[in-house]
Amino acid sequence: MSTRRLVVWCPDWPVVAAARAAELGPLVPTAVFAANRVVACSASARDSGVRRGMRRRESQSRCPDLVVCEHDPDRDARLFEPVVAAVEDMMPGVEVVRPGLVAVPARGPARYFGSEEGAAERVVDKVDAQVGVECQVGIADGLFAAVLAARRGQLVAPGLSPEFLAPLAVDEIDQLVDQPSGRQAADRAELVDLLRRLGIRTLGQFAALDPADVATRFGRSALAVHRAAAGQEERPVLRRQPPPDLVVSEQLDPPVDRVDRAAFAAKALADLLHARLAELGLACTRLGISARTEHGEELDRVWRCAEPLTPAATADRVRWQLDGWLNGRSGSPRPTAGVSVLGLRPEELVGAGGLQLDLLSAATGEADARAGRAFARVQGMLGPEAVLTGVLDGGRDLRDRVRFVPWGDERRPVLAPDRPWPGRIPSPSPSVVPDSPWLAEVLDAEGRPVGVTDRDRLTAAPHRVEVAGGRSRAVSRWAGPWPVAERWWVELLAVSAGQTAPASQVPPRSSVRIQVVLEADPGEGDLDPGEVALLLVHEQGRWWVQGAYR
């Protein structure tokens, strides 16, 4: 069952923080940039056509008066502290999701103020009066639904979060509560693009998919998105109570009143905390940060993250929080003395293995060590080639994309996989790739073999396909052909040099690809009895099945 949450959202917070730091007026068109692209922009900038993700040159051409600010997470966290303090004055249990977004369990405030509507109104008035910042409040079951409700200023009735989420576009996945790294953000954008190309346009359509199919086709990271789209908690609700010995603290002598000095202690504490968690096979998803000043002032804040925190992510949040405390503006309880005690405590733990983390990047180093010893033992009994690990390589052909190397050898790609590789099969890739291609026959409506002309065109439209001598199945849809000529220049260079190509030289390769969708056939034994899509390649005068989409 999802926890009902009240979420306070400050629109365009990176822009608000940047404008406050630069003492800009609210009507000045402003945009915050990271990697030369717009991260956030003000309402006046949007009125001029500036949009998130736009390049700097294009945004400035649309709005010549645009004020450009660089993205600064430390600034965002520091200036957001007064907002958090204003909410905390009214409601206990505040969790900082990210700068610009806080969450509170909704049950207590609703009972104290008489209703959820009353609690929402009081929060908006309090933040505006104490900090002078505009905010919106949303209440719903589940944090993801509450975030989207806050962006719309809605209160979703209990039990209706799935209905609220169902008609929303899959692009809203971008509003998941965590702060993804560059790679995670790219994976999330790729997931949205893939879902749209598969015809899945709304969160309801994505939530209707079977979780097992989502895990198989889209991977582990998509499972949290799938749960959130269904109005559930992004992680299973079962939690472990943190053992008391996991609380780590350090006496700072002399007390520190500068963030750069406190950051050293924060990094050491983060490493110590995660070392203890690794020994127990646990990972932290809610982190409590506490500090005591030389005058006895107690400061405390809880940060929440959708994914398990790493030591670097923990140190970042501690630094942000210390920056907010030590350099607080009006409305924030700025300490009157330096911090003498700094402490970290895990508020919420999950099993590192239960998160299905990648074997080689699991949260516990002991699991890596045990797996490595087991692999080495198998290699000792059966030989080095008995245990292989995959390496993603570059290339245009499926046969070139994955290379297996013995366990323990260097896993370095021969060709860079992130190059453009024109002619490569676009995503999604086939879910089944045989060790060696299956021989196939492609027939037209008259039962004659379909070939390829000298101009790389099909001699007829595919009508039926027979795979590996099995039963033929009718083609319902097909696309292509797409010719690919690789290393065609090898023979030209050899001829111009007056010699033949070396025997070790990779020979030229020319092929034509098509994609076909075969109709359902309940009597089929080898292939899926339902519809199945195949990637067919015509090479050396024959058709081959290089992969299947299931």
Image (tube, rainbow, N blue to C red):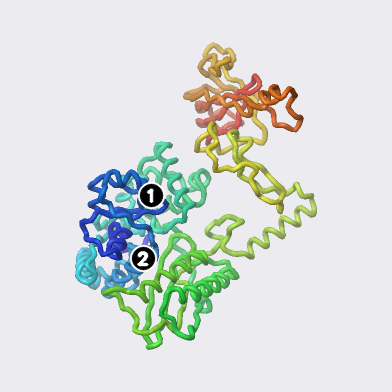
Tell me the element at label 1: strand
Tell me the element at label 2: helix
Quadrant in which the N terminus appears: bottom left
Q: Are marks 1 and 2 in contact (CB under 8 Å)?
A: no
Q: Looking at the picture, tell me which residue is in the foreground, 149 or 179.
A: 179
Residue type, numbered disc 2: Arg
* Residue at 43% from the left image edge and 60% from the top image edge: 306
Mark 1 burial class by Cα count in 10 Å: few <14, some 14-19, many 20+: some
Q: Percent from the top left, x then y, of residue 400?
A: 63, 37
Whichever of callouts 1 and 2 sits on the residue coming sooner in the sequence is: 1
Q: Percent from the top left, x then y, of residue 62?
A: 27, 44
Question: In screen coordinates, is 215 left or right of 367?
Answer: left
Q: Looking at the picture, tell me which residue is in the foreground, 404 or 436.
A: 404
In this rendering, does residue 470 appear at all?
Answer: no
Q: Is residue 163 above or below residue 536?
A: below
The span from disc 1 to disc 2 (Cα, nearest Å) is 19 Å
Q: Percent from the top left, x then y, of residue 391?
A: 63, 46
Instruction: Give the labeled residue for mark 2.
Output: 75
Q: Is residue 34 above or below residue 238?
A: above
